[in-house]
Image (spheres, helix red, strand yellow):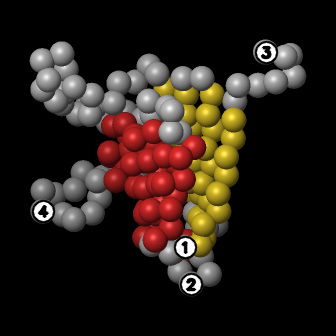
Amino acid sequence: MHEYMSMKRIWELTCPGLPEEVGRVRRWTRDVLHDSPHADDAALIVSELGSNALIHSASGSPNGSFHVSLHRSPGTVVLAVTDTGGGATKPHVATPDQDDTHGRGLGLVAALANRVQVNGDDYGRTVTVEINDQHQSPAKHSARGTRVALPAPRSMA
């Protein structure tokens, strides 16, 4: 490789704050990562984070938007979803009751990722997620073909 070239690649996408844009971001993520072993986990993560931006911030209001960036380098994918703020609470991993229909998204994201970081304030928050080859997805099968149990959620930095 030439000394001025990098194996790191960056993609960015800003979406209107509409529910159908979550599906668009998921497809976009899969397209960008089509040859990566992290494509499925990243698509699920970006779906959860995009949905959270629409539900829990002003991103889902009329004229709202959210921004996604994807950084790819050998063995590592870093996703960041930025909302437009206005949310009543800071993103956190919840422990929902069994019958609750919401509250599992960030826990799922934390289980799939090596690192989850939340930055920002009431004017906009960014949730950044890193997935790398050091992490085995909980959906991977064991040698006997049975599913491996989900690991405990990783720390939110």
Element under label 4? loop
Which label's residue is closer to the chain start, 3 or 2?
Answer: 3
In the image, farthest residue toward the right:
4
Of residues 134 and 26, the one drawn nearer to the viewer in this rendering: 26
Cβ–Cβ under 8 Å for marks 1 and 2: yes
Image coords of residue 81 (percent x, y): 56, 54
**Quadrant in the picture for residue 52:** bottom left
Q: To which quarter of the image does residue 109 belong?
A: top left
Q: Which is in the foreground here, disc 4 or disc 2?
A: 2
Residue 17 — which label? 1
Which residue lies under the disc numbered 4? 99
Label 3: which residue? Answer: 1
Q: Which is closer to the viewer, label 3 or label 4? A: 3
What percent of the width, then of the height, locates residue 28? Answer: 54, 53
Q: Secondary structure at mark 2?
A: loop
**Which residue type carries mark 2?**
Pro
Callout 3 touching callout 4 (CB < 8 Å): no
Dot 3: within a 10 Å radius of its alpha carbon, few (fewer than 14), some, or many (20 or more) residues? few
Q: Residue 62: which numbered mark, if any? A: 2
The answer to which of marks 3 and 1 sits earlier in the sequence is 3
Determine whether the residue tagged by mark 3 lies in a helix, strand or loop: loop
As measured in the structure, the alpha-carbon distance from the residue carrying label 3 to the one carrying label 4 is 54 Å
Q: Residue at x 16, y 57 (%)?
A: 97
Of the image marks 1 and 2, the number of the one nearer the N terminus: 1
